[in-house]
Amino acid sequence: MQEEPIPFPVRINRYLALKGYATRRGAEALILRGSVMINGRKAVLADKVQEGDTVSMKGVSKPSPSDFQYFVYYKPRGIITHSPQSREKSIADIAGISGVFPIGRLDKESEGLIILTDDGRVTDRLLNPRFEHEKEYEVLVQERIVPGVAARLREGIQDGGEILKAKDVIVKGPYEMNIILTEGKKHQIRRMLGGAKFTVRSLRRVRIMQVRLGGLHPGQARPLHGKARESFLRDIGL
């Protein structure tokens, strides 16, 4: 198993997540319980781990890789990924799978593939843009797609001081295209298409690396197991 390099200095909860002891939230519980030591003293939530520090655990063993759960989930349109406000509902409210959390997010009006897991190591390995993991989206737009649009989206659209680029764009019809990203900036596709004078009618994520949405319907999930699980973990270096 390849261990993720630690970007020192690093918050103690993230350090424990990268080391595979717990999710960041789970790590905070371990710290508050007094189970985490840094250089022989009890850690507190605000601590940062420096290179060369000794971090030890009291009465806590690292979970076996076989203990972790991974699910492919179809987030419905109108559902918040997490942290709902007022009358909103989140994935946790409707998925019916306890002990897992979503990796990354899809905005409320978008739908499609989300990975759910209780493995805290996955977050940085899947979301950090330096790994350049592909994510593919099916997009339906209001305006007719004219020649040159795909090339413009690959070259980049400037928005809010950022250059937003697609790795690839496949035009599938007069109003349909698939967009492949490796960056994953906030609302990236909607911002890119807005800059290119398109109105998004629907946006659905259908693939993350080699994991595909397949035949799932909104609100449905399937576990990643067997060769699919092995391939997913291998592709993110676990």
Image: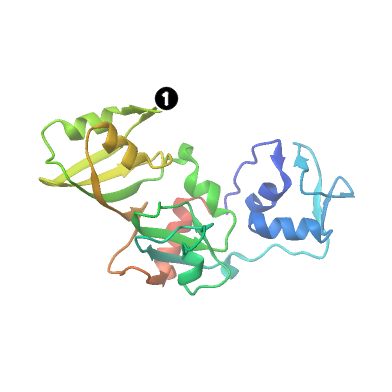
Q: Position of residue 76 (x, y in %)?
A: 36, 63
Q: Position of residue 65 (x, y in %)?
A: 59, 64
Q: Residues within 10 Å of mark 1 (few under 14, many from 20)?
A: few
The image shows residue 180, relative to residue 203, as above or below, that is above
Q: Is residue 35 left or right of residue 194?
A: right
Q: Is residue 167 left or right of residue 171?
A: right
Residue drawn at point x = 22 percent, y = 34 percent: 197
Q: Position of residue 145 (x, y in %)?
A: 13, 39
Closer to us: 31 or 130: 31
Residue drawn at point x = 86 percent, y = 45 percent: 39
Q: Quadrant of residue 228?
A: bottom left
Q: Is residue 1 left or right of residue 133?
A: right
Q: Is residue 233 left or right of residue 179?
A: right
Instruction: Confirm whether residue 21 shows in the render.
Output: no
The image shows residue 214, relative to residue 136, as above or below, that is below
Residue pointed to by mark 1:
161
State how the image is colored. Answer: rainbow
The quarter of the picture where the N terminus appears is: bottom right
Residue drawn at point x = 46 percent, y = 57 percent: 81
Instruction: Confirm whether residue 197 shows in the render.
Output: yes
Q: Position of residue 134 (x, y in %)?
A: 36, 46
In the rendered structure, which amino acid carries the disc numbered 1? Answer: Gly
- Residue lying furthest bottom in this view? 96
Helix, strand or loop at label 1? It is loop
Closer to us: 202 or 2: 202
